[in-house]
Amino acid sequence: MMATVWIDGAWYAKSEAKVSVYDHGLLYGDGIFEGIRIYGGKAFMLDGHLDRLFDGAKAIALEIPLARGEIEKIVREGIEREGKDDGYIRLIVTRGVGDLGINLRLCPRASVIAIFDDISLYPRESYERGLAVVTAPTRRVQGDVWDPRVKSLNYLNNVLAKLEAQLAGCAEAVFLNREGYVTECTGDNVFVVKGGALKTPAPWLGLLEGITRNVVLELARGLGVPVEETTMTRFDLYTADECFLTGSGAELIAVTSIDGRRIGDGKPGPLTARLLASFSERVRS
Ligand code: PXG
């Protein structure tokens, strides 16, 4: 099946799914989204994604014109229509159609879009070998500009860092915040393993609190691994025993080089492998 799309009350095939050029999501990046994995015919961690969607809407004063239960129903129906066990859902809420000019009062109703498709962020072989990443010259936007906890449609900050990664011959970039602390990647959260403990940047440093991140933290605790949400600099990345990224798109992927420094022995590490095994089991349970 070729992707199924729901837009404001009607279902469309991928080639027929269209929005207005006056939609403020397109004109200004004004809106929010979620990327949700389908495993075994079910939306993984749907509650967490909807919590984050509604919190993001609240933060930017965007009224979602559907109740939570209605969105859940669209998600169930889309999965059924698409007819796949595994896949990906992109939920989008835009400020809706307005005029030219940022005047929000001229956008009477938010638009809701749900795309049911597949996603693959990194090449298959990177999942066996691990990724080479760089730290991005572009800093992560911080809470005093707009809060990266809002999964907003404005991804230019992320796009620029991704471009910097690609110019450096890498697939992914790690963002630092203005103080130089590690925050996250362009579409993933970052973890390191050092001396048997698992560390990841604390949310208050300015990052999206990933659903996958929180699942991995919970799995690690369940395995008796000490976990720490903390401040990290590039030193902590370069000297890590292991490093990996998490996200709904990425799932869990090892990092084997950062800014040209080899991580551990240059291969995906043992705790990364254990957590990946637990994660694979968790998404099927
Ligand atoms: N940080 C950022 C900036 C993200 O965009 C994550 C962390 C991980 O969060 P979750 O909740 O997914 O564990 C994201 C998620 C895409 C794509 O199309 C991006 C994400 C997820 C799925 C697809 O690039 N970003």
Image (spheres, rainbow, N blue to C red):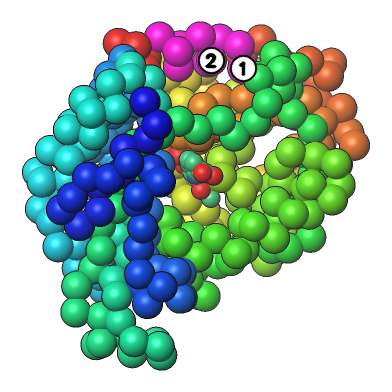
| Viewer-side residue, 236 vs 277 | 277
Mark 1 is on which residue type?
Thr
Residue placed under numbered mark 2 in the picture: 276
In the image, the segment drawn in magenta is 272-281
Query: Which class describes the residues within 10 Å of circle 1: few (<14), some (14-19), or many (20+)?
Result: many
Tell me which residue sits at (70%, 47%) in the image: 174
Image quarter for residue 30?
bottom left
Query: Is residue 56 placed above or below 122 in the rendered structure?
Result: below
Q: Is residue 9 left or right of residue 246?
A: left
What's the residue type where badge 2 is placed? Answer: Leu
Q: Which residue is mark 1?
A: 272
**Placement of 193 over or under 208, stated as above or below:** above
Q: Position of residue 2 (x, y in %)?
A: 40, 31
Q: Position of residue 235 (x, y in %)?
A: 80, 42
Crowd around label 2: few <14 · some 14–19 · many ≥20 (10 Å): many
Residue closer to the observer: 174 or 63:
63
Q: Position of residue 61 (x, y in %)?
A: 26, 73
Residue 39: image location, x then y, percent: 35, 20
What secondary structure characterizes most of the magenta part? helix
- Residue 88's image quarter? top left
Q: Nearer the viewer, residue 159 or 143?
A: 159
Indicate whether 57 appears above or below 244.
below
- Residue at position x 23%, y 28% in the image: 81
Q: Are the residues at dot 2 and dot 1 in contact (C-beta closer than 8 Å)?
A: yes
- Determine whether 111 is above or below 40 in the image: below
